[in-house]
Image: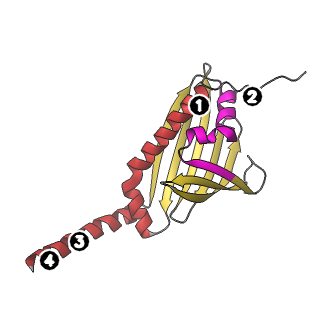
Amino acid sequence: MKILKYFLVLLVIVAIVFFGSGLLTPSVTYESEISVNKPVKEAWSVLSDESKVKDWIEGYKRSELVSGTPNTVGATSNVYVDNQGQEMMMTETITEFIPHKKMAMTFTMDFMDMDYEMTLNESNGKTNIKSTSTTKGNSLFAKSLMSFMKSGMKAQEDANMARLEKVINNNTTDYFQETN
C-alpha cells in the first residue's frame, strides 16, 4: 500500500511539473542560421523554387494554393508533409513578403501554430540566411509538450537549413537567363 501511495505522489508531482511547464512557457522560439556562397538573388530564387523545397525541408510532399496570389501577403496554402509515415496537413498564410530580403508566414495545425520568418542579407558575394520560429501549442497539453520539444524542433530546423545551404551552394539552375 505504501508503494502505491509513493507512486501516486510521484505521478502528481510529474503532472504538476509537466503542466506547469506549459503554463510558464506558452510559446517556444528558436533560430537557425546559414551562410551560402551565392548572391542574395540566387539564394532567394533557389529557396523560393517550389521544385526544390522537397530537397531541403524534411518530409515535404506538396503545397496547394487555397486563396490569394502565390508569394503575396495573405496567400493561403495547404502544405502536406510526411510525419513518421502519416500525411499531415497544415495551413500556411504569408504574413510578409519582401523579395530577396524577407518572407514570413504562419502555419496553423490542430496541435500547434507556428510563426516562421526567414531573412536574407548579402555581404561580399555571400548570403546569410536566418530563420526564426515561434511555436505555440493549442491546448495546455500541447503547450506543455512543446516546452519539452524545443531542442528537437531546433535540431530539425538546423537540419533543414543545412540541407538548404547544400541545395543553394550546389545550384546549377540559371534563374536569370537572358532572352534574345
Q: Whole-Å distance between the Cαs marked 1 and 4? A: 56 Å
Q: Nearer the viewer, residue 167 or 16?
A: 167
Residue bearing the label numbered 1? 167
> Few, some or many C-alpha atoms within 10 Å of disc 1 (few <14, some 14-19, many ≥20)?
some
Which part of the image, by quadrant, shows the N terminus?
A: bottom left
- Tell me if 32 is positioned left or right of 171 in this view: left
Q: Secondary structure at mark 2?
A: loop
Q: Secondary structure at mark 3?
A: helix
Residue bearing the label numbered 4? 4
Mark 4 or mark 3: name the one nearer the start of the chain. Answer: 4
Q: Whole-Å distance between the Cαs marked 2 and 1? A: 14 Å
- Per the rendering, the mark at residue 175 is 2
Mark 1 or mark 4: name the one nearer the start of the chain. Answer: 4
- Per the rendering, the mark at residue 11 is 3
Q: From this viewpoint, which residue is outermost toward the left? A: 2
Q: Whole-Å distance between the Cαs marked 3 and 1? A: 47 Å
Q: Position of residue 155 (x, y in %)?
A: 42, 43
- Tell me if 90 is positioned left or right of 66 in this view: left
Mark 3 or mark 1: name the one nearer the start of the chain. Answer: 3
Q: Are marks 4 and 2 in contact (CB under 8 Å)?
A: no
For discs 4 and 3, the disc positioned in front in the rendered view: 4
